[in-house]
Amino acid sequence: MADAAEVLAAARAKGWRIATAESCTGGLIAGALTEVAGSSDVVECGFVTYSNAAKQKMLGVTAASLEAHGAVSEQVAREMAQGALRASGVDLAVSVTGIAGPGGSEVKSEGMVCFGVATLRGVATETVQFGALGRSEVRRATVAHALALLLSTLS
């Protein structure tokens, strides 16, 4: 499993800066990165966009995407990552939107998290079903997976 220090070292080696766009994690990914001393040369900013209105206003997520796919969707994760990249002028942005729990639905169950990773070359998305681990564990697993995605993109 990737840790924040590895992500920062890999970004530093490429001369890249990072932004985060977070919903279900509420800033925990940015928090993990900035927990490492000296991270300010890599971490530009983090957007905590918990509400749909914040996703639209701060990151440019479209009302049409929210209506058609819902906030917890790869389409919204894509737009969040692209919006963070555009708004911050960084080289790499990661986004997360999901259902940490408790609750969910048959279609979108507790532990479902959509991820986006954007660079100037494009954006990739994926959905992970962590399962009903409980709110704290889903959020912790989401942070770990986001760090792994960042490291993979930097490698």
Image (cartoon, grey):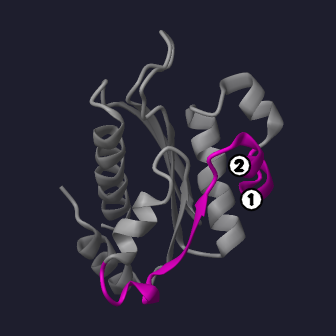
Quadrant assignment, res 137 = top left
- Relative placement, left or right, of 10 versus 21 is left
When the figure is inspected, residue 20 is found, relative to residue 112, above or below; the finding is below
Q: Which residue is mark 2?
A: 55
Residue 77 x %, y %:
58, 43
Which residue does the image show at 33% across and 85% down from the upper left? 13
The reply to whether callout 2 and callout 1 are in contact (CB within 8 Å) is: yes
Residue 142 x %, y %:
36, 46
Residue 68 x %, y %:
74, 23
The amino acid at mark 2 is: Lys
Question: Where does the N terminus fall, quadrant-wise?
Answer: bottom left
Question: Where does the C terminus fall, quadrant-wise?
Answer: bottom left
Label ID, residue 58? 1
State the extent of the magenta-drawn residues as a range.
36-61
- Relative placement, left or right, of 62 versus 132 is right
Quadrant assignment, res 112 = top left
